[in-house]
Amino acid sequence: MSWDIDVSEKLYQRLANEIFFRILHGKYRTGDKMPSYTELAKEAGSSPETVRKAFRELQHYGVIEKMRRGYFVTADEAVVMAYRQQYLVCPNCHEMIHNAD
């Protein structure tokens, strides 16, 4: 699987953005357990520390939650739907656009 990561931001921010859009597109669904730092680091070609920082960023925005058994996509569908409406032209069309508001 190839990761489409832009080079103008810090690596952990780029990784957080990629994971964020994978959540919006349903690769990781609400309530799902996220892969471990090590698994995502291998997949993305980064370090586990970079993944940890990306998770912290996503946690800050309420997209993922830390639980005793790891990180999970928020179970709050309203949070994900709000981000879909803000960042996707059509939540079911997989066409990305950021609204200027």
Image: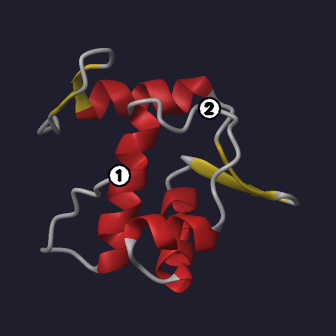
Q: Is residue 88 left or right of residue 48?
A: left
Q: Position of residue 68 (x, y in %)?
A: 88, 60
Mark linked to residue 1? 1
Tell which circle, 1 or 2, labels the residue nearer the N-terminal end. 1
Q: Is residue 39 left or right of residue 97?
A: right
The residue positioned 85% from the left and 58% from the top of the image is 69
Q: Give the secondary structure at mark 2.
A: loop
Q: Quadrant of residue 73?
A: top right
Q: Amino acid at mark 1?
A: Met
Q: Quadrant of residue 66?
A: bottom right
Q: Amino acid at mark 2?
A: Thr
Is residue 100 shown above or below 36? above
- In the image, 97 versus 22, the foreground residue is 22
The residue positioned 68% from the left and 38% from the top of the image is 32
Q: Is residue 31 left or right of residue 4?
A: right
Work out which quarter of the rendered image holds the C terminus and state it: top left
Mark linked to residue 72? none
Q: Position of residue 29 (x, y in %)?
A: 57, 32
The residue positioned 50% from the left and 58% from the top of the image is 58
Residue of label 2: 30
